[in-house]
Image: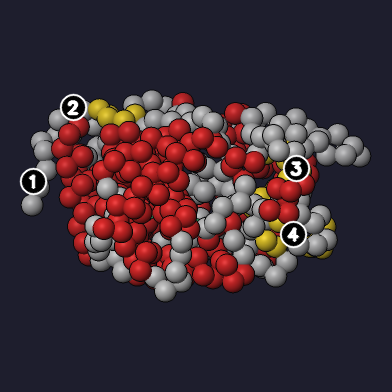
Amino acid sequence: MSTGKSALPPHPPGDEPVPVPIWETWFSAYPHATYCAMREHQGSLVPVEIAPGVEADLVLDHEIARLILPDDDHYRVDPRRWQDSVASDCPALPVLSWRPDALRSDSTEHTRYRRAVTDSLKDIDQYALSRMAETTAKALINQFCTAGAADLLHEYAIPLTVTVLDSVLGLAPAPAQQAFTATAALYDSLDPAAAHQLLIEAMQEAVEIKRTHRGADVATSLLAHPSDLSTVEVAHTLAMLYSLGTELTWNLICITLAETITADLAAQPLSTRELIDEALFNNPPLAIANPRFPRGIQPLPSMTLQPHRPVLISLAAANQSVQGDRTGNRSHLGWGAGPHECPAQSEALLIAGEGVSQLIDALPEIALAIPADQLQWRPNPFRRALKAFPVTFPPSPPLPLT
Ligand code: HEM
C-alpha cells in the first residue's frame, strides 16, 4: 500500500522545533512519510500537538519505545496529574482523561483491574470462539459473494467482529446496539465525551441485565471475580474491552487483507499468522499507544523528558526501524509491551485469523476496487483505520454453512 508524501514543513536548523500538529488530517493520510520526515529533521523524539494547543512528545524509535513501555517505575498511564494541569475546556480531555479501568491505571490498581480482565479472558472457550468466528465469517461472505463487489469494512470486518465480541462479552441486544452506536460516534469523533458516556450507559445496562441472566461470558466472569469490582468498574472494564476489541480487531482484519491483496502476498507461502504479523509491523491498528506521563525529569539517551508532559509512543514508527527479513519475526510493537501489553492477543488473533483466512479461501481472486493510494484513512493519529474498503472479485456461489 502506498504511504504517500508528508506535508511536514522542513524545520530550519537552529530554530526551536515547532510542534507537529498530528491532529490535522494530512498526518493520518501520510503517517509513514511524516514519521520519516520527522526523524530526518528532528530525531527520534519530536514535539507534537495532539489537539490545537495541546503539546506532547512523540517517540519514533524502537529502542526507546522498548525502554519506556515496560517502565512503570518512571512512567504513569494514569493521566490525572496532567489532567489537573490543563484547562477544563482542553480539547484533548474527552479522549485522554482518567477512567477506572486497566488502560488508565498504575501499580496495585492496575494489577487489580488487569487480573479481573485476564482471568475473565481465560474463561473463554477458544474452540467455541473460533467456530463462531468461522461461521459468522462464512454467513457474511454469502451475503455479498454473488455480487462481485463489496465494502469489506462495513459488510464484513465490522459485523464479524461486533457479532463475535457481543457474544464473548455477553451483551444483551439492546445494550449491544447502543454500544455500537456509541462506538460509531466515537469513531467519527463526534462529541467524544457524549459518545463515551453513551457507551458507559450501555455497559451499565448490560451489567444490570447480567446480574439476573448469567452466562458463559466475560461480563459474568467479571461480576464473579474475587477482585470485587463495583458496577461502575465492571461497566468501564466492559466499555474498554468493547472499544479496543471491536475497532482494533476489525481494523486488523482490513489492514491485513488490504496488504495481502495489494502486495499479492496470498500467492506467497505465508501463513495467516505471518500475514497478520506483517500488517502489525507496517500498519499497527493502535498506531500510537496510550500516553505515558513521566513521574519526574526523565533522562534518556540523547534526550530528556519533562515530568507529567504526555509522551506518545508511535508503535507504527518504532516498527519502521526494524529492518531485515521479517518472516517469523514478531519484534513489532503492534500489541504494545510491558504491563499494559494487550492481554487479548490470542482472542484477537482467532477472530482476525478466521476473518482473513475465510475471505481469502472463499474469494481468492479478490482485488481492490480503487488504486491503493486512493484508500481513505480516518483522521485519527492514534488509530490506523480505513474509512471504507471497496473490493471486486469474480461472483462466486455461496459457501456451504455446516
Ligand atoms: C478481542 C480483542 C481485544 C481485546 C478484548 C483487547 C483488550 C485490551 C486491553 C484490556 C488492553 C489494556 C491492558 C492493560 O492496560 O493492562 C489492551 C491493550 C492493548 N491492545 Fe488490545 N485488545 C484486543 C484486540 C487488540 C488488537 C486487534 C490490537 C492491535 C493489533 C490490540 C492492541 C493493543 C495494544 C497495542 C495495547 C497496549 C496499549 C498501551 O500500552 O497503551 N488489541 N487490549
Task: Compute the Cα span from label 2 to label 4.
Answer: 53 Å
Q: Earlier in the sequence, mark 3 or mark 4?
A: 3
Could you say whether the residue bearing mark 2 is in a helix, strand or loop? loop
Task: Compute the Cα span from label 3 to label 4.
Answer: 16 Å
Could you say whether the residue bearing mark 3 is in a helix, strand or loop? loop
Residue under the point 49% across and 41% down: 196
Tag 1: Cα neighbours inside 10 Å, few (<14), some, or many (≥20)?
A: few
Q: Which residue type carries mark 2?
A: Ala
- In the image, taking residue 183 as reference, residue 310 lies left or right, namely right
Q: How is the image coloured?
A: secondary structure
Q: Quadrant of residue 147?
A: top left
Give x and y (percent) for residue 209. 29, 52
* Proximity of marks 3 and 4: CB atoms separated by less than 8 Å: no
Tag 3: Cα neighbours inside 10 Å, few (<14), some, or many (≥20)?
A: few
Above or below: residue 82 compared with residue 24: below
Give x and y (percent) for residue 122. 35, 70
Residue carrying label 2: 147
